[in-house]
Structure formats: C-alpha cells, structure tokens
Amino acid sequence: MKSIYTLLIFTLCANAVFAQNEDYYNPVTAPVKESYEPVTPQVNTFKTNRQKAIFAKYSTEKIRNRWYIGFDGFVGTDKSILTNNLQGLIDTKSASRSGYGASIGWVNQEKWGLELEYARSPIHNTLIINNANPLEYKMDNDKNNIAIRVKRRILFGKSNSSVRRSAFWIGAGAGIVPNSGKQKDFMEFEGYLRRTRLTSDTLYLSSNTRTNTKITGFADASAEYVIKVAKAFDLSFYARKRWGLGNSLSTDLDYYVNKVQTQTATIKADGSGWAVGISLRYMLFIGHDEGGKHELE
C-alpha cells in the first residue's frame, strides 16, 4: 500500500512539470511599445535671443553725436623745386616720408565730422650732385604740422543715415607748419675741372639749409573708408593730397670757380605731395537720439 501512494505522488508531480509552457524560459523579444518616439530636450534660448537683441540694438540705433581720439601712421611723398641746376651739376627729386600723429574728432548724426590733428611729419629738400657716382643728400624741417578738417559721409542713398556703420568719408582741411627759422644743415663740396693737361679749375659748392622764420600753411583733401570694428573702436584707411602754402624749407647753393662766385641756386619745399595711412580711433562717448550718454563697456 505504501508503494502505491509513492507511485501516485510521483505521477502527479511529473504531469505538473510537463504541463508548463515550453517557452517559459525563453527571453521576451517583443517591444514594450510598437512605436518609440525619442523625447527632444527643451533648449533654453534666453541667452541666444538676448545676444541677438543686443546686436540688433547696437546695429540699428541712431547716433546723435560722438567724440573720438585717433592715432595715425602714414607714408607718402613730398616734392621740392630747384631754381637752377648749375649747368647740370646738381638736381633734386621727390622724397619719401613717413610720420605719425594724434587727433580728436567730433561727428554729428553720422553725416558731418570735424577733426583736429597734430602730426610729426617732415618736409624735405633733396640735393643731388651729379658725377660718375651721384651723391644724394636729404634735409628736413622741424616736422610739426597742425591741421583741422571737415568731413562728410557718403551715404549712397541708404536709409537710417544716423546709424553708425562702416562707410566712405571725404574731407577737406587746412593747417599750419610752425617753423623755427633755424639752420638745419650746412655742407661744402670741392672738386677740380681739368681744362688742359697743365691747367685745371677749382670748383667749390656750399649748401645752407634753413627753415622759414614765419609760420607756413597747407591745404589738403582726403578720402577714407572707416570700418566699425567694435562698439568702441573704428579703423580708418585713408589717402590724402596736400598742397603747400609757403616754403617751409629752403636750401641756398653758392657755386664758385677759382674762388669766384659764378652762379647761385635754391631748393624749396612747401610740403606738397601724397600720403596714405591708417588710423585707429577710440570712441570717448556716444550720444543717442534717445538722449543721454551711452556707457561704453
């Protein structure tokens, strides 16, 4: 009887095991959702929109007036005039020059400008003595120049002309050249000219260079392209034509043959010439149409 109960229990347990699903231990491969849509993160655009708003503000706001200071560097030429070449013995030519300066300017409604400039730039006399190996000497004045200029912006039909932006400007001005009246250079040259096998002439040439005892002047015209590189800075590329009004520098030449003065000549320079340069300008302050001063950061 005990064996029959044991067999019956064994049979019931075996039926329960085989009655389970054959896939009971297989992994589930069906997706949780038939369609999965990724969630897009929300981006905070406050900072980007604020930057765009600031850029739009400063690129379109109208300017009532502004003041600036500028620092210039330039290169150019100036010419001198020779009254007598002493029968081909001497000559002159245009000289290259370089200089630097500082300026202060005022601009009204981005249309008209007024600028005051001080520049250190020489006016030259060039003396050339012709021979087998020509000799060249360059003399210059006191190098002081003070100019005032009026400028006008070229609008090309653009609206919002009071908005500060990169633009072309043209200008005209006048200035003075303070002269000390001092002697700048004195030179002497001596040579010989053979007439026959037994005789020769002694040649002597003196050169005395002085600045004018009075103030001289000049007028100029300019064209420039001004680039707005930052809220507080502009960069200007310009070309300028200058006309001298009065000789700032004179070189008197005396020519002697056998200790007898035979001819004289003079080289004069008034500063006429061309120049090209670059100017970096810093805005001291900017006044807007809304009133008040704009604080530069």
Image (tube, rainbow, N blue to C red):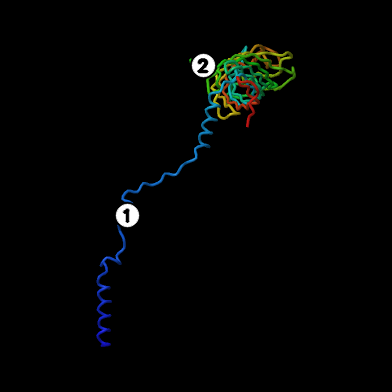
Q: Which mark is residue 155?
A: 2
* Element marked by disc 2: loop
| Residue density around tag 2, few if under 14, some if 14–19, many if 20 or more, within 10 Å | some
Residue 84 in percent (x, y) is at 62, 12
Q: Which mark is residue 118?
A: none
- The residue depicted at 36 percent of the width and 46 percent of the height is 37
Say which of marks 2 and 1 sits in front.
Answer: 1
- The residue depicted at 32 percent of the width and 54 percent of the height is 31
* Element marked by disc 1: loop
Observer-nearest of 297 and 180 = 297
- Label 1 sits on what residue type? Pro
Residue 275 in percent (x, y) is at 58, 21
- Label 2 sits on what residue type? Leu
Q: Work out which quarter of the rendered image holds the N terminus and state it.
A: bottom left
Whether residue 86 is visible here, answered yes or no, is: no
Disc 1 target residue: 31
In the rendered structure, which disc, 2 or 1, sits on the residue that comes first in sequence?
1
Vertical relation: 12 (above or below) 69 = below
Observer-nearest of 6 and 150 = 6
How far separated are the C-alphas under marks 2 and 1?
Answer: 68 Å
Q: Is residue 6 left or right of residue 297?
A: left
Vertical relation: 260 (above or below) 134 = above
Q: Work out which quarter of the rendered image holds the C terminus and state it.
A: top right
